[in-house]
Amino acid sequence: MMTMQRLSVLFPNPLGCYDYLSDSPVEVGRFVVAPFGRKNITGIVWHRSADENFPESKMKKIIGVAENLPLFSRENMKFVDWVANYTLTPPGAVLKMAICADLGKTSKKPIHFDIPQTQNTLIRFSDAQQKAVDELNEICAEGFAVSLLDGVTGSGKTEVYFEMVARALEKGGQVLVLLPEITLTSAWLGRFQKRFGVMPAVWHSGITQKQRRDTWFAVVSGEARVVVGARSALFLPYRNLGLIVVDEEHDSSFKQEDGVLYQARDMAVVRAKLADCPIILASATPSVETYCNVLSGKYAHVVLPERFAGASMPDILLADMRVKEKREKNDVRFISPLLREKMSERLQAGEQTLLFLNRRGYAPLVLCRACGERLKCPHCSAWLVEHKQRKCLQCHHCGYTRRLPKECPACGAVESFVSCGPGVERILEEAHTLFPEAVIEMITSDTLGNPKQFADITDRMNQNKIDILIGTQILAKGHHFGNLTLVGIIDADMGLSGGDLRAGERTFQLLQQVMGRAGREQKKGTAVIQTYAPDNLIIQALKNNNRSLFMEEEINSRRALNMPPFGKLAAFIISGKKQDLVAETAGQIAKNAPYMSGLDVLGPVPAPIAVLRDKYRYRLLIKSKREIKLQAVIHQWLSKIKIPSGVDLRIDIDPYSFF
C-alpha cells in the first residue's frame, strides 16, 4: 500500500497554511499546484509539519509539482514567517509580496542583467570618505552587522556605500539597495551606471508585469547581482544576499500603510540577520530609533562630517513672518521680502533657487465669504483642496474630484468662494508675478506621470535651463543640482503640530534635507526659513545647524513618556459602513483589553479622519513597556473577540501615521 506524504502548503493569499496529500515526496520550498475552493492555484510547500491527526480521508491531494519554478529557500521562508508574526498578519499575505502573480508564464525575450564592474580607477575619495570606507570594510567583514552611515548633505555617502557594494559583489553576494521614493531612482541609476558600467535590476510599482517576472527569476537564480527598489524589493527571494543598504533610512515612506503594515527599514535589519550579511543605514538626518541604537552600541556609527570637495554648508536665515509689512490692503503674498530679495540676487548672478512647500494644489481650503461654508469631500471627513491647473477640487485622501461650484450649496451666494492658504500652485503663480522673466518649473506627485518626466526636469535643472524650481517633499532628498544656491522654505511651521510623536522629528528631517540642496559645490549656499515661530526649538536647531540640540530634546521627551524606542506602540483601526456597528465593535475590543502592569489602552475614539472612503473609523492605541511581548498579548486579547461581518480590524504594529 502506497504511503501518502502530508504537505503543508502556503498560498499567496491572506490566510495560513493548508494541509494536502501527495503520492510522492515533495521537498520543502517546492512550488506545487493544489485545489483551493473551486480553483487550482500555486502555492509553496512550507517548512512546517502537517497535522498528522487530521483524517486522511478528508484531505485533498495536490495536482502536481511546478518543476519549472525554482526552489523557495528556507531563509526566505523564515523571513516571511518573521514578518507575519511580528505584524500579526497571515503569512500568505506576506508571501504574496514575495512572488509574482504570473510566474507560470515565460518571456520570449527575457531581460538579462550584466555583471557590474567592481574595479574603478577613476574614484578619488576625500580623506573623510576613505576613513568611512575603511571603517565599513572592517565592520562588514564580520557578517551580520548594522552600521549607520551618518553624513551631512553633500558629503558623498552614496559613493562610500557604492564601494561597499563593490566589495560585496567581489565576494559573490547579491546586493539590495532600498530607496524611499521611485522618483529618486532615475538620478541614482545614472550614478550607479557611471560607477559600475551597467544598470542594476529595478523593482518598484512603476515597472511592467514582464519586467517584474523577468527580474524575479533573475533574483532567485542569482543573475541579478544588484537590486535597487522601493520597500517591496525587500521581499524578493534572494539567492545569496551579501549586503543591504537602506538609503535615507529615516524616511517615513519606508512604512507601508496599506496591505501588510510593516517598516521596511526595520524588516531589512531582520532580513540581513537571517542572511548573516551586513546592512548599512545611510542618512544625513538619522531617525531617533536608529540614533538610539547607535548610542546603545547596537549599531556601528560611521560619520562623514563635511561636504565633499570643500563645499560648505549653507547659511541659514530666518524670515519672521510675524513682522507686519507695509503693503496694499488686498495684497496677499506668501514669499517674504527677505526671500524675494535673495531670489532676485540669484537671478542676477545666474544661479538657481528652490522654493519648498509640502502642500500640493493651489489652496488647502476653499470657503464661502458670504456664509463661511467650507467645501468638503462627500466620502471623507476632509476639506477639498483646490487644484487651479486642473480646474478642480480634490480630496487628497480618496481622490474624489469636482468642479468649483458657481453657487454656494449652503447659502446660494454666487461666485463667493475664496481660496485660503497657499499650495505650490499658488507659490508658482506668485513667483511668475514677481519674476516674469525667469524660467520657473513646478514638481509635485500630481504633475508627474512617471519617473521619466521627473528625470527630464532634473536634467534641465542640471543644464541650468531652469531658474526657479518649486516643489513638495519629492525634491527634499537625493538630488544634486550644482548651480542651486538658494532654498526657500515657504511654511516651516506646517509640520510642527502634526498630532503624533514623530511630527517634530519629520519636520526637522525634511527641512534639513531640503536646505541641504543649496550650495553643494563651490558656490556658497543660503537657505531662508519662513516661520511664525522663530523661537521654536526645532526652528532654532535648524537655524544653528545643531542636530544634537534637537536629538537630545527629542530623546529625553520620548524617554519620559515611554514612547518608542523606549516603549512599544500598536494601533487598532476599526472601520465599516455602519457607524453604530463600528463604534460598538471598538467598544467591545476595549472592554476585553487585558489588565496588566506596563500596558495602557487609549480609546476607542473616532479617528482624526473619522470617515474615509465612506467608511466610519475608530482607533485604539496600545502603549506598553519594552519588556512586554506585545504581539502575544494582542493575539490572546483578540482571540476572545468575534469581529462582526461588515467591520474591518487592522492592526498596526509600530504605527507611523495616526490619521
Image (tube, grey):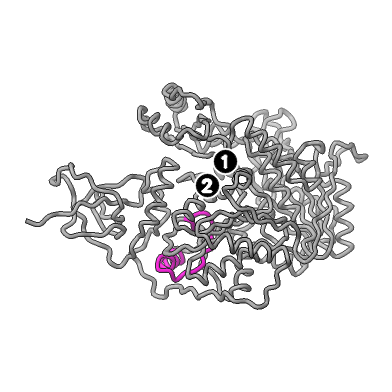
The mark that comes first in sequence, 1 or 2, is 2
Give the image quarter of residue 187: bottom right
Can residue 425 be seen here?
A: no
Q: Is residue 220 shown in magenta?
A: yes
Is residue 91 shown left or right of residue 534?
Answer: left
Crowding at mark 2 (Cα within 10 Å: few <14, some 14-19, many 20+): many
Q: Position of residue 588 (x, y in %)?
A: 42, 23
Q: Main secondary structure of the magenta part?
A: helix
Report x, y in % for residue 224: 47, 69
Residue 103 lies in quadrant: bottom left
The amino acid type of the residue labelled 1 equals Tyr
| Residue holding disc 2 | 263
| Residue stretch rendered in magenta on the structure | 210-234
Q: Which residue is under mark 1? A: 656
The answer to whether residue 235 is left or right of residue 451 is: left
Asked if the residue at tag 2 contacts the one at tag 1, i.e. Cβ–Cβ closer than 8 Å, the answer is: yes
